[in-house]
Each structure stands twice: as C-alpha cells, then as structure tokens.
Amino acid sequence: MPQYKGYSIAVVEVAPLRWFSTIQRLDGRKMKSPVTGETLTIWECHHAADSAEAAIEEAKAVIDGSGWDAVAE
C-alpha cells in the first residue's frame, strides 16, 4: 500500500476499470470526514477511477485538500 504524508492508501478494483481508494492514518488516530464532519478511522473515496494509479492520485488530492492536520482526538 502506498503511503503519503502520514497516511496509508489502499486501492481495490470492484469491476473492470472501476477502482476505489481508502485512506487511513499510519498512527491509527481518527480523522474527520471532509464531507460530513463524521469521525472516521478509514475514509472511503466515493468516486471510481479507471486505474489504480488514478485512484491513488484522487486519494492524495483528498488528503491535500482535507485539512486533516487538525484531526479528531
């Protein structure tokens, strides 16, 4: 699994050319959903990508735009 800025990114192909990614903190702490504000251990990206690489890039964009430096305790 790739790692990015203190997060682990996992990808799964659910159908041909339909890849999804999940994000989890490496230190096990929880994070707040950038969409709902809910406290989560694992964030599931909601948009399918056409390749594993594209799903990873989407997860990186979520991490960069999420403000997760201020995570839930």
Image (cartoon, grey):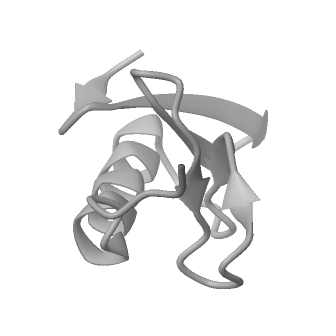
52 horizontally vs 67: left or right: right
Give me the residue at 66% from left, 41% from top.
42
Residue 26 versus residue 56 in the image, above or below: above
Residue lying furthest right? 15
Give me the residue at 22% from left, 65% from top.
64
Determine which quarter of the picture holds residue 32: bottom right
> Where is residue 29 shown, x and y percent of the image?
52, 34
> Where is residue 35 shown, x and y percent of the image?
62, 84
Residue 50 versus residue 65 in the image, above or below: above
5 horizontally vs 26: left or right: left
Residue 59 in sight here? yes
Task: Tell me how many marks there are.
Answer: 0
> Where is residue 11 shown, x and y percent of the image?
57, 32
> Where is residue 9 shown, x and y percent of the image?
44, 32
Nearer to me, 22 or 12? 22
Q: Quadrant of the N terminus?
A: top left
Give me the residue at 36% from left, 73% from top.
66
Nearer to me, 43 or 59? 43
52 horizontally vs 61: left or right: right
Nearer to me, 73 or 65? 73
Residue 18 in sight here? no
Give me the residue at 53% from left, 78% from top.
34
17 horizontally vs 1: left or right: right
